[in-house]
Image (cartoon, rainbow, N blue to C red):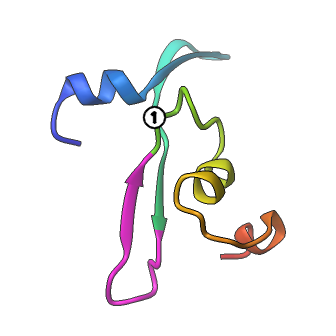
Amino acid sequence: MPDRATFETLARRDDVPGQIGAEEMKFLVLGVDTPQPALFFLNTNTYSDHYKFASEAVHIGISLTEFNTI
């Protein structure tokens, strides 16, 4: 993450118990067990969950069940 402005663009505020108004930004690491893992920072305002990002933005081409096992 290069700077606070980028974080602000990708993050969203969420009201969860104990953390009212907490800023949240998700990330995804694919290929963690390979020589070339890939780190992605999600636009959390656009993609509410990791699988949606992986399937729509990265086009991983696997089912949610498969995704949850990797």
User: Where, quadrant-wise, is the C terminus in this rendering?
Assistant: bottom right
Q: Secondary structure at mark 1?
A: loop
Residue shown at 67%/54% (left/top)? 51
Which residue is drawn at the image coordinates 54% and 26% (left, top)?
45
Q: Where is residue 27 drawn, in percent x and y? A: 46, 49
- Up the image or down, 38 lies above or below 44; here it is below
Q: Which residue is mark 1?
A: 25
- Pick out the residue farthest to the left: 2
Query: Residue 55's spot in the image, x, y percent?
Result: 65, 58
Using residue 11 as the reference point, say whether residue 45 is left or right of it.
Answer: right
Q: How many marks overall?
A: 1
Q: Nearer the viewer, residue 26 or 61?
A: 61
Compared to 25, does 57 lie above or below? below
Residue 31 forms part of the magenta stretch = yes
The answer to which image quadrant residue 69 occupies is bottom right
Q: Is residue 44 above or below residue 21?
A: below
- Give the amino acid at mark 1: Met
- Name which quarter of the figure residue 8 lies in: top left
Which of these two is toward me, 60 or 36? Answer: 60
Give the residues in magenta.
30-41
